[in-house]
Amino acid sequence: MNKFTSEMVDNYANKLLFNLTEDENKLVLDEFEVIDKTIDLINEIEGLNELEPMTHTLDDFEVDLREDIPEESIKVEDALKNAGATEGREIEVPKVVD
Amino acid sequence: MINKSITEIHDALASNKITSEELIKESLEKSHEIQEKYNAFVTIIDDAKKGNNTESLVSGIPFGVKDNFSTKGILSTGSSHTLKNYVPIFTATAVQKLLDSGAVMVNKTVLDEFGLGGTGTTGHTGIVLNPWDKTRMCAGSSAGSACAVASGVYPYALGSDTGDSIRKPAAYCGIVGYKPTYGMISRFGMFPFASSLDHVGVLTRSVEDAAIVVDAMKGKDPNDMTSWDSNHIHLKDAITGNVKGKKLFYIKELCDINNYTNPNEELIKHLQNFQDTLKICQNLGIEVAEESINQNILNAINSVYTVISCAEATSNLSNLTGIIYGPRSNAKNINEMMIDYRTKGFSPLIKRRLVIGSYVLQQENQERYFKNAQKLRRLIVNIMKEFFTKYDGLILPVGCGPAKKLDGKTEQLSKEANALEEHLQIGNFGGFPSITIPNGFVSNLPVGVNITGACYDDENILNIAYALESAMEYKGQIAKEVE
């Protein structure tokens, strides 16, 4: 049995809120196989398990936290400028709860 | 005049031989001509106006901006259908710094959708053609910026670089592409793709121009917590051309033609040309040494990149719902609206990358895929940092030759590892400063060489690139269509 199935791929796509065509699904399956084989090679590299996963690009990464003082944010009318439908100061969406 | 260097144009402005208005007019006319031929732009800003006069060398001079930078009041699409009508309410810091210096933005350039591609073929406005040969790609994702600068529309355009998105298109178009150390330029307002790999940079026709533009853009930004204070770094002042005693290394496994099964003629010539470039380095007084890296590690570079970048992209693109911005769907309920918007809006490539990202982030898969990729990223970075204690930089050919043919293939992960094609991603893994300059021609088309160094050592890397550029004959070249 294949490790990766088209149902599995569709399931992931649905979680990401889009649909795939059959051709797109097939391409994802092919790419999963490619990545999986390379990961097998990666797992054979000596000393890998002793390393910490690299999550930040710079080792000396420092964050200066600003004072907790309210700052001016964007205006409501600006925030609404790119929304497809608005009503007053709000973005309009279809009714969610009956 | 618009196809000259920044300092030449600046001098002409200072001596009143030309005005900024005349430069803008020339750049806009050229933009329309290039758009007709190569499809490099999403937007041409026909009503671009002269900015404030400042002391900056970029004052009064037109420039281009990749369309994944937010520009207030100007369409900014990321070359995606999902944002085809998006007009930001603020301007990216990097762009704003140039505008504050008096530079004049004249167009927004095409990219591979959201930067997730390397061909210049997946933007929502169509394929960008290579100005040297319209049957070939510009590479990507900064395809439009590379095309425009190579065509002489202006001296520079902004790019972003997550894997090689500035440095490979620069090579394919015969120009300079520079991404500085991670965080030297603020990413605020640049559409995020993979935040731990994303860099802002520039495409120019000379190393000096790259230094001038990054000097104008760099600096700590309270809106980007990964940016840092670079007030002590003065790139233009650092490029003296004095490189005697500098040390470079190259990686044997990537540069030895005997390592390739059935190499094609372009690869053979590209690697021969690279060896000629090494001789020029030696003639400049630079020591050049050969080093070796485990082939399995080199072969895994692209998988590390794919796993990490797709995982980060899955998170970064989750805000695209079509509700707050983007073309709204007419579906009946909010869930169907988002599905309809994302299904129709994303290109097939983006969807494939996001599914991979989601898969590797699932709890049951994280250790095998995502964590192991992050561990190998650290191993590769550690290896490079060790080399950088002995050498000023790594020098390597860019890609496997000149620009590839546009053959209509989808941008699919290859079953065969090709580290020569992908090694620039190392620069993103470690946040290293990295610059590509043109170093010759293969099949009458430009090819490039890349120099990458230790973090924060940008002055040194640019100086070496400047010396090498000065010893060759490709500085400032403008693309000429070949048969």
Image: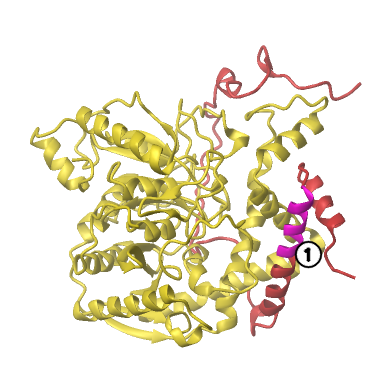
Where are the magenta residues, as a range?
A21-31
For label 1, the SS is helix
Left or right side of B383 for B322: right
Q: Quadrant of residue B152?
A: top left
Q: Residue furthest front?
A: B483
Subunit that carries the residue with mark 1:
B
Picture residue at 57% right of the left edge, 17% below the top: A77
Left or right side of B248 for A6: right
Task: Verify whether residue A24 appears in magenta.
Answer: yes
Q: Colour of chain B?
A: yellow
Left or right side of A71 for B130: left
For this rendering, which residue is in front, B125 or B292? B125
Q: x and y percent of residue B141 in the render?
A: 49, 51
Q: x and y percent of residue A29 in the render?
A: 77, 61
- The answer to whether residue B80 is visible is yes
For this rendering, which residue is in front, A52 or B336? B336
For this rendering, which residue is in front, A7 or B239? A7
Q: Quadrant of residue B283?
A: bottom left
For this rendering, which residue is in front, B278 or B433? B278
Q: Quadrant of residue A17?
A: top right
Q: Quadrant of the N terminus of chain B?
A: top left
Q: x and y percent of residue B241 in the render?
A: 18, 67
Neighbour tally class for label 1: few under 14, some 14-19, many 20 plus, Cα within 10 Å: few
Please give the letter of the chain rendered in red. A
Left or right side of B365 for B9: left
Above or below, comparing residue B363 to residue B213 in the picture: below
Q: Residue furthest top?
A: A88
Picture residue at 58% right of the left edge, 68% below the top: B302
Above or below, comparing residue B333 to residue B251 in the picture: above
Q: Quadrant of the C terminus of chain B?
A: bottom left
Q: Which residue is mark 1?
A: B365
Residue type for callout 1: Asn
